């Protein structure tokens, strides 16, 4: 391998790593919108259901591929997006090969990696190569067609035909608009090698036979799309629509993209001036496929079916090939500057131009993820009726099935139907007063919450015990405790956190202190303790003499297991006492207790000290 080839290999490897990094780093950024959820639901059926209960305007190819992918990797959303990501990375590699072949032996390698870099760094492409739809696979087929068709038209051997035919036969099963790009290859054959047109026609006739089962669906979809979109386009400002298309490529760096395009056009003009007849035919074909198809779409009836940034994604391989080809004809410093500007276009990540606005759609995925992590056993979700995002849609069903233990979040219509603590989901400012009151009844609103203002879930905690156990004779009641992490076995160095709930029937005559103790089960050895006034984030009044009758209070304290203790069984005790003399208030006889303390729990501590003695 020559030094130039080694250098080109390293550069192209770096370019592909940039493309892979741009795509993979955003796989988990967005939740699925309705079209993606529909695709997953449809692909989750049997093959018979996919083939017989077809989407109105989309052929079944992607659903069959996604169905197979699900059988291999499962239904997790990141795993599903990986199919699109891998398709996008393969598309970048194919664009490199196509641009390299088109630009010729001298400028070819630079044209290839510049085209692949522009493709891989584009926000416009990154979004579609992370969406669970057919667009990424269609991009891969389009990029592969550019490369394979160039090889075939140069020398149409049987071996090359064996690769070319399935590509043109199967691409329409992913997206019907692919037929337009495939038809344009005929114009290329006519311009470059007209004597091979009959061979091309033979391949296309065979591909058409393969497409025949899709013809009724294609005609129905075309009719529906043209009618619906024509009505919508009648009120569309064409200038604004073109501006949206431009911003899709520029990522709002409009001037930078303009500089890149002007430089690329200048390079293409120079390439055309020096090109042979074959190269000019190649250039005309790619130009017709890219910007030419955009113009054709607008000035013909195709406008009513294809005039959107999504459907015109089929021109992207050609557009980026032209950019790479043009920049490669410029002086080396201009090529380097172009590469830098291309990378600038990728900053910042801005996917919102290409999908339903994210802020208009409830972030169901992120809420389900948060609840799967934060929700405790017995907690229930209450969705305010004015929230506008109840757990009955596709998003709720899908994300619960993959993120939530058991596949379903326990829910209740209001707080009165929830036996324990509640996550209350609301749109702030629109809460239903009756539901809000039922959620607050017998619970304390905590500072634990998740979500934006229009889809925010707040934790209302209920004491574990009702009515609890009396402690002392002054009306104080222990309402239960929660120990985190869950009981044992523990090891030295672990921190045990205890939340204990309290209320009083009457004003208390004194300020009491609380004590948390870790003791051996024989009760004779005190290992660790935490004493002090009631404290915690939900303890507005630390002096018990000022506690209000009927109100709920939560004390929070923790103990760290000391180093070097013996392994064995230990108890966790809680005491209420007069700080002046240490006198403990005895719990009621029915309460679990030890030495005038509430016996909260018993557990094992595993210590290496046991084995060292």
Image (cartoon, rainbow, N blue to C red):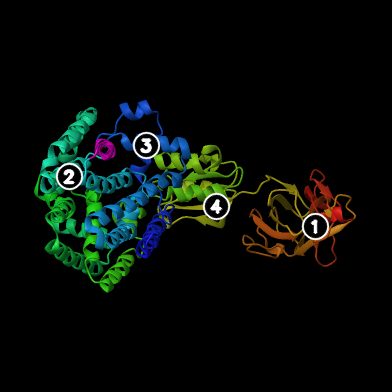
Q: Are marks 4 and 3 in contact (CB under 8 Å)?
A: no
Front of the two marks 2 and 3: 2
Of mark 4 and mark 3, the one earlier in the sequence is 3
Can residue 413 be seen here? The reply is no
Mark 2: give few (<14), some (14-19) or many (20+) Cα within 10 Å.
Answer: many
Mark 2 highlights which residue? 185
Q: Are marks 1 and 2 in contact (CB under 8 Å)?
A: no
Query: Which structural element holds mark 1?
Result: strand
The residue shown at (38%, 41%) is 37
Q: Label 4 to label 3, Cα distance in Å?
A: 42 Å
Mark 1 highlights which residue? 517
Query: Which structural element holds mark 2?
Result: helix
Between 309 and 273, which is closer to the camera in this rendering? 273
Report the predominant secondary structure element of the magenta stretch. helix
Q: Where is residue 38 shown, x and y percent of the image?
A: 35, 39
Of mark 1 and mark 2, the one earlier in the sequence is 2
Q: Which residues are magenta?
A: 157-173
Mark 4 highlights which residue? 459
Query: Which structural element holds mark 3?
Result: helix
Q: Label 4 to label 2, Cα distance in Å?
A: 61 Å
Between 572 and 152, which is closer to the camera in this rendering? 152
Of mark 2 and mark 3, the one earlier in the sequence is 3
Where, quadrant-wise, is the N terminus in this rendering? bottom left
Mark 3 highlights which residue? 65
Q: Label 3 to label 1, Cα distance in Å?
A: 60 Å
Front of the two marks 4 and 2: 2
Q: Where is residue 405 shown, x and y percent of the image?
A: 56, 41
């Amino acid at each position: 391998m020559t030094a130039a080839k080694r250098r080109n290999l390293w550069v192209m490897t770096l370019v592909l790593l940039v493309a892979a990094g741009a795509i993979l780093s955003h796989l988990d950024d967005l939740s699925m919108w309705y079209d993606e959820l529909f695709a997953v639901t449809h692909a989750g059926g049997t093959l018979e259901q996919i083939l017989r209960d077809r989407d109105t305007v989309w052929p079944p190819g992607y659903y069959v591929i996604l169905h197979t992918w699900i059988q291999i990797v499962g239904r997790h959303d990141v795993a599903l997006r990986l199919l699109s990501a891998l398709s996008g990375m393969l598309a970048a590699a194919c664009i490199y090969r196509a641009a390299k072949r088109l630009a010729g032996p001298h400028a070819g390698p630079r044209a290839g990696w510049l085209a692949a870099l522009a493709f891989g760094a584009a926000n416009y492409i990154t979004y579609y190569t992370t969406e669970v739809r057919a667009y990424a696979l269609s991009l891969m087929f389009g990029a592969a067609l550019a490369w394979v068709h160039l090889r075939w038209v140069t020398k149409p051997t049987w071996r090359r035909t064996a690769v070319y035919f399935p590509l043109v036969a199967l691409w329409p099963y992913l997206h019907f608009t692919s037929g337009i790009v495939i038809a344009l290859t005929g114009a290329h054959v006519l311009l470059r090698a007209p004597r091979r047109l009959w061979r091309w026609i033979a391949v296309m006739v065979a591909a058409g036979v393969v497409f025949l089962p899709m013809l009724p669906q294609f005609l129905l979809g075309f009719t529906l799309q043209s009618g619906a979109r024509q009505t919508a386009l009648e009120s569309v400002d064409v200038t604004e629509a073109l501006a949206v298309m431009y911003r899709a490529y520029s990522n709002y760096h409009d001037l930078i993209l303009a500089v890149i395009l002007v430089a690329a056009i200048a390079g293409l003009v120079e390439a055309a001036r020096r090109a042979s007849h074959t190269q000019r035919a190649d250039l005309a074909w790619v130009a017709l496929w890219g910007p030419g198809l955009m113009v054709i779409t607008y000035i013909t009836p195709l406008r009513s079916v294809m005039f959107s940034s999504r459907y015109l994604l089929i021109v992207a391989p050609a557009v980026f090939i032209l950019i790479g080809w043009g920049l490669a004809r410029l002086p080396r410093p201009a090529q380097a500057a172009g590469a830098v500007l291309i990378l600038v276009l990728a900053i910042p990540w801005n996917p919102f131009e290409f999908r339903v606005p994210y802020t208009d759609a409830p972030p169901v995925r992120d809420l389900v993820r948060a609840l799967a992590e934060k929700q405790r056993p017995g907690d229930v979700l209450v969705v305010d009726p004015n929230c506008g995002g109840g757990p009955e849609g596709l998003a709720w069903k899908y994300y619960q099935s993959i993120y939530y233990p058991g596949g379903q979040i326990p829910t209740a219509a209001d707080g009165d139907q929830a036996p324990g603590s509640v996550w209350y989901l609301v749109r702030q400012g629109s809460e239903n007063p009756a539901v809000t009151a039922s959620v607050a009844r017998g619970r304390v609103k905590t500072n634990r919450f998740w979500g934006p203002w229009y889809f925010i879930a707040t934790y209302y905690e209920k004491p574990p015990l009702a009515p609890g156990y009396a402690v002392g004779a002054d009306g104080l009641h222990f309402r239960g405790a929660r120990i985190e992490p869950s009981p044992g076995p523990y090891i030295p160095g672990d921190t045990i956190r205890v939340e204990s709930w309290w209320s009083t029937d009457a004003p208390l005559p004194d300020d009491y202190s609380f004590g948390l103790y870790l003791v051996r089960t024989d009760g004779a050895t005190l290992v660790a303790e935490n004493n002090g006034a009631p404290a915690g984030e939900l303890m507005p009044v630390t002096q018990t003499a000022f506690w209000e009758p009927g109100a709920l209070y939560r004390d929070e304290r923790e103990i760290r297991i000391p180093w070097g203790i013996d392994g064995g069984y230990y108890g966790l005790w809680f005491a209420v006492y007069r700080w002046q003399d240490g006198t403990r208030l005895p719990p009621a006889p029915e309460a679990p207790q030890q030495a005038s303390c509430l016996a909260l729990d018993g557990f094992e501590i595993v210590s290496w000290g046991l084995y060292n003695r």
